[in-house]
Amino acid sequence: MGKVTSIPQIRRDRDYAYVRLHGRKIQLGKWDTPEVGKAYRRIVLSWASNPAVLIKPGEQVTLDELCVAFLRSRNNQNDHGNFRTAIEVLLSVYSGEPVESFDFSHLEVVRGQFLNRGHCRSQINKLTSLVRSIFYWGVPRKLVPTSVSESLRYLKPLMEGQTTAPENSPRQDVPNDVVVRTLPYLLPTVADMVRVQRAACTRPSEVCRMTVGEIDRSGEVWKYRPRKHKNSWRNHKKTIALGEIEQSIIAPRLAGKQPNDPVFSPKDAMQERYARDAAKRKTKVQPSQVRRKVQAARNPKRKVNDFYTAESYGRSIKQAIQTANKRLQDEERIPHWTPYQLRHAAISEIIKTTGSVDVARAVAGQKSIAVTMSYNHADELIAEEQAKKRRVG
């Protein structure tokens, strides 16, 4: 077995609890109160987002240490937010427990906590699966006994009609006019991501991870071949065709970049935000503020990732809509939408205009036509369009 070292430890200062992290003393609240445990778990999850894990063989591993090692190995990859949610619930029940003692019954209790928090059935199944995958990840790294991971396989997913968990409502398309109304409130980088995703019918993760070297610009139609995508683990190759609309958006963002550089970078978005805020500023910048900016640039407390994730991309859109709605009248407010709804809208539009599910399947890069049929009731869309063409006489 192994042990992850250097996890921030709770310390006591008279009647209060605190941790030391990166040279800072962070107060957690009054000693021996439930708030301390919650605050400590948030600190550990935040600390776990940093890269690199130090493992020493020969000592017992706790669930906290396993989760920290797992999060640090992923380093903000997609589904990071869901993993953090799953881990937070897991540790809220079994923090400090040894990995060796965890089994089928404990996972069932954790799943019950997802239900108590109001998650829908499909999300409960997903979060439970993510908890299980953490243990699978730990087996080859000598952090989890094989017997533990094997016991977790016996917990079957919740089935429709056999649980009190609510069903998730089908994801709806986002109307084009809603997207157009949102664009002015987005940073230029995020707005361009939205335009490209909508035009090219990509998954959110695919537009987030797009690099310069993955785009073949030799032909009239550019071809984006992502090295990593949803089905890359099945050895499926994917090619996304980029037409004039996408090319006109992407081309200005390629200048001066290397093949492995992202087309859409959070660092570019941060500079855009600074420039936007500076343009809105009405008072003179004080010398002390200039010095703080210089110091922050030299020693940034918050690391900016090289790539967006599906979660951070969606969060940027959500925050922009919330900011916009604070300024808009009730009748002008923008309804909330997510990047996943863009893909749904693109697929639905292709089906409506071509009357072909197979064309939509090819553009979306899906291997199975059955998957495409599930998007917004594709068969209903085709039937509706055909019914419109039928006329009396």
Image: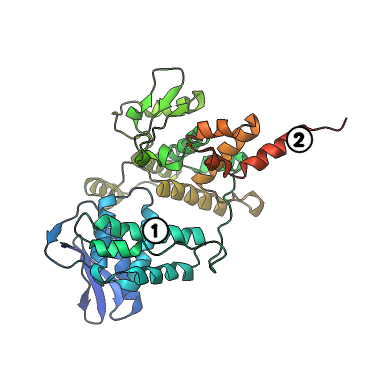
Question: Residue 388 has which mark?
Answer: 2
Q: With 134 as the anchor, is 12 left or right in this view?
A: left
The spot of residue 240 in percent (x, y) is 45, 30
| Among the 4 quarters of the image, the one containing residue 181 | top right
- Label 1 – label 2 distance at C-alpha: 44 Å
Residue 214 position, x and y percent, is 35, 29
For residue 108, above or below residue 314:
below
Of the two numbered discs 1 and 2 in the rendering, the one whose residue sits closer to the viewer: 1
Number of residues whose C-alpha sits closer than 10 Å to that of mark 1, classed few (under 14), some (14–19) or many (20 or more): many
Residue 271 makes an appearance in the image: no
Q: Which of the pair 261/153 is nearer the observer?
A: 153
In depth, the one of 23 and 126 nearer the eye is 126
Residue 32 placement: quadrant: bottom left
The mark nearer the N terminus, 1 or 2, is 1
Q: Which residue is mark 1?
A: 129
Residue contact at pointers 1 and 2, CB within 8 angstroms: no
295 or 188, which is in the foreground? 188
- Within-10-Å neighbours for mark 2: few <14, some 14–19, many 20+: few
At numbered mark 2, what does the secondary structure look like: helix, strand or loop? helix
The residue most toward the right is: 393
Percent x, y for residue 171? 57, 50
Front residue of this view, candidates 289 and 370: 370
Q: Residue at x 51, y 26 (%)?
A: 245
